[in-house]
Amino acid sequence: MNEPFVAHIREVDKYQQAVQTHLTETAAIARELAAKLDLPEVGELLGLMHDFGKYSQAFQEYIKAATGVNPDVDVEDMLPNGSKIDHSTAGAQWVYSRLKKFGAQNGIGELVGQMLGLCIASHHGAGLIDCLNPEGEAVWLKRFSKDDVLTHLTECEQNSDEAVKRQAESLANEDLVKLLLKPLAAILKQPDSNEKIKEFHLGCLTRFLFSCLIDADRINSADFEREEQKDLRCFTQKPNWQEAIDKLETHLGNFEIRYPIDQIRREISDACLKRAADPQGIYTLTVPTGGGKTLASLRYALHHAQKHNLDRIIYIIPYTSIIDQNAEAVRKTLGEDWVLEHHSNLDPEKQNWQDKLLAENWDKPIVFTTMVQFLDAWFGGGTRGARHIHPMTRSVLIFDEIQTLPVKCVHLFCNTLNWLTQFGKSSAILCTATQPLLDKLPKSEFGELKLAENAEIMGKNDQLNKLFDDLSRVEIHYQPKAGGWSLAAAGEFLLTQFQTASSCLFIVNTKQWARDLYQYCQQQNVPPEALFHLSTNQCSAHRKAIFDEIKGRLKNKQPVICISTQLIEAGVDISMACVIRALGGLDSIAQAAGRCNRHGEKDGKGQVYVLNLQEPSLAQVLPDIHQGEIHAERVLREFVGRDILQPAAMQQYFQYYFYNRSGEMNYAVKNSTSGSLLDWLSDNSSNVYALKNNQRTKPFPLLMQSFKSAGQAFQAIDAPTRAVIVPYGEGRELIASLCGEWNPKEMYRTLTKAQRYSVNVFPNVWRKLEREQAIYEVQAGSGIYYLKDGYYTDEYGLSVDETGIMPTYTF
């Protein structure tokens, strides 16, 4: 009997996984995942053929040499100059050649074959490959036409197990093409979308299928390497939403009505419950800060998920905020098993055996993540983020503080969310006190949100105005000074307010201002026990400890001065007698106001002051804040004597800030004459290609997207960060554990905990820490780093040296 062909060789004991086993097991998982959109056979075929190229003798010789099973063969001699054995193109060629013959007259078979072939060809690369490169070359066709000598397709067909061939032949038929015909036709027949948007949506469907394949492959490979971790998987389990509903309703029923605002919060929650039975779609929840959006939106989501038999609830929080408090509120109500936080980039991109376990695949019913993670999953390069696309289908997506969406990503975001809700069986809620009106964009031909009928959960404009009136708890005073407020003047103003208001919060735009103002207060002999500093240089566990101490002092009516960057504005349940805000966007000012007299506990209204500080020019380093300052000041002057927290003022602000920047919303590609990412990910209109989609003769177009090039160009934020675990509190023990002996189950749990003890670091700071030899990998090649003792202080968090504090003008 011939030896089976090998897919993987386990590192610890050199046990061999047969290609047949890997293909059939991956196919079963991919079938389960693709069934979310009624495409089980499509997922099964992808899983079955993704590693078909491993049936080549060249790959067999390579894997045995690379893993030491055949030590007499030198891998470098076998693969000179960094070359590789191509084991992914063979399956792509097989699927494409089989499927393109179906529906040749209308092009449906070739489109289906191209989509599935792209997924297979891309599964070990840097994400989906380009169909066209930025120069307009049809690189996908070159890949699919690659010589048999290099892809070994003929050899693999001869060597492959009969069971695999039979299963593949039974799947790659006209029925499978017809199965995909329904979602493809639905996309291409959208009556209110142009060709660009339709073809963008074809790309979304392709990304979904790619996500199913990538996750299935990584799960099977990781679980073969570490069999004991299989019990951590729960991706096939359906949540018992009624159990969560019962817990939440009990929790809400125990709420005590102490202030009038508590009654209003209950009415908001009841409105969410009432609307939860609505049809699926995109809805808005416009509630002033302090209105209890987190639990109200959770109530909506749980009942909505149960009503429509959905799989998951995903909270997407802006990357400028912290998410641990909202997650903790839900965790306390429903329990640890319900909630997953995924807000750190601790897990590296490289897919080695350690990383596969550590890469999150969002396998809990309620996930808290960030807008950066959401955008990276859809538009970033690599395969790590792609695993999170299929969990976004059949889900309730709750976008908190949606007005913080990066302007350059607006059309990409709107078109993606429309696909998720129109074709991905998901629903979405846009939560904020300051709706940016993404359904009324000035250049709607590039894609704007398609809201559900009667989309606003809190009712019509007059009802919203009344709600904002009822929840009005502060007065806002804009006090500009010619040339701006100096540090000394701003500090003196803070201490003056502190004499009459025992608790004061001063929110600034940069870490340097926060540090300098904190040090000014120290020099003025503010009692150290009353003085607090907050910034994202501190890990979330550190910030939580500071918040807890502040809340304890406020509860005991002890004096507090807190100086913070704007991280405190979103999702932080804290109430101060007085708030001072550096001039910024009107939405940020509104969020700051939500930290003043938050529960209406003060007789009369709380006082909020807006000061124009003497900051360095933010136009280059923080352009969004700079634009926000300009347009907020305009609205503050136009609405003198009127409540600038009302929806009318906010709409005017977004008219100036958001809509006047409509030319930036397509994500222009830097240093390129090829247009925008929206163009690259849709019809590629600026590229040279024989079959322009606006000139095509067949109803089903071939994909033209530059997926890989777009992924390389995309950055959700201009200076992407990397995470480092810091030696704060339990972080020290977690670092020691991660540096110790590898244990899969313990490592998984440890890394989950470590996210709360990590700080995201900008590239320039990371480079300096490397030069200082202040960061180390927990294990060689893991891509997971920790910070050396002495580079983290109780006052300021992460520092660039053992004594100094990091001077930076970033958040």
Image (cartoon, rainbow, N blue to C red):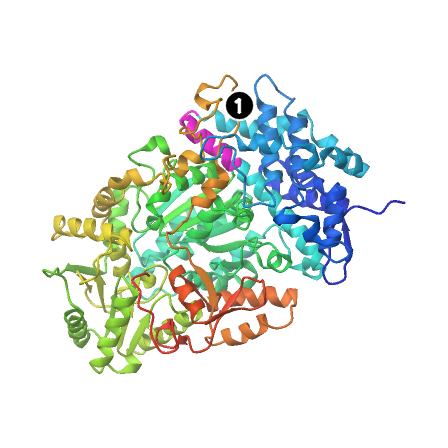
Q: Is residue 195 a member of the stretch shown in magenta?
A: yes
Q: Is residue 65 visible?
A: yes
Q: Is residue 557 a member of the stretch shown in magenta?
A: no
Determine whether 471 is above or below 660 in the image. below
Quadrant of the rendered image containing residue 608: bottom left
Q: Is residue 116 visible?
A: no
Residue visible at 33% across and 58% down in the picture? 263
**Is disc 1 surrounded by few (<14), some (14 to 19) or many (20+) residues within 10 Å?**
many
Q: Circle 1 is placed at which residue position?
A: 700
Determine whether 599 is above or below 211 in the image. below
Depth check: give the residue in front, 66 or 275. 66
Relative to residue 561, is residue 231 drawn left or right? right
Image quadrant holding the C terminus, namely bottom left
Q: Which residues are magenta?
A: 191-205
Residue visible at 48% across and 19% down in the picture? 696
Depth check: give the residue in front, 372 or 681. 681
Quadrant of the rendered image containing residue 486: bottom left
Quadrant of the rendered image containing residue 804: bottom left
Image quadrant holding the N terminus, namely top right
Depth check: give the residue in front, 150 or 727. 150
Tell me the amino acid under the disc marked 1: Phe
Determine whether 579 is above or below 586 in the image. below
Position of residue 313 measured from the top left corner of the image (x, y, whole percent): 50, 50
Position of residue 115 measured from the top left corner of the image (x, y, whole percent): 58, 33
Position of residue 712 measured from the top left corner of the image (x, y, whole percent): 46, 45
Q: Secondary structure at mark 1?
A: loop
Depth check: give the residue in front, 576 or 733. 733
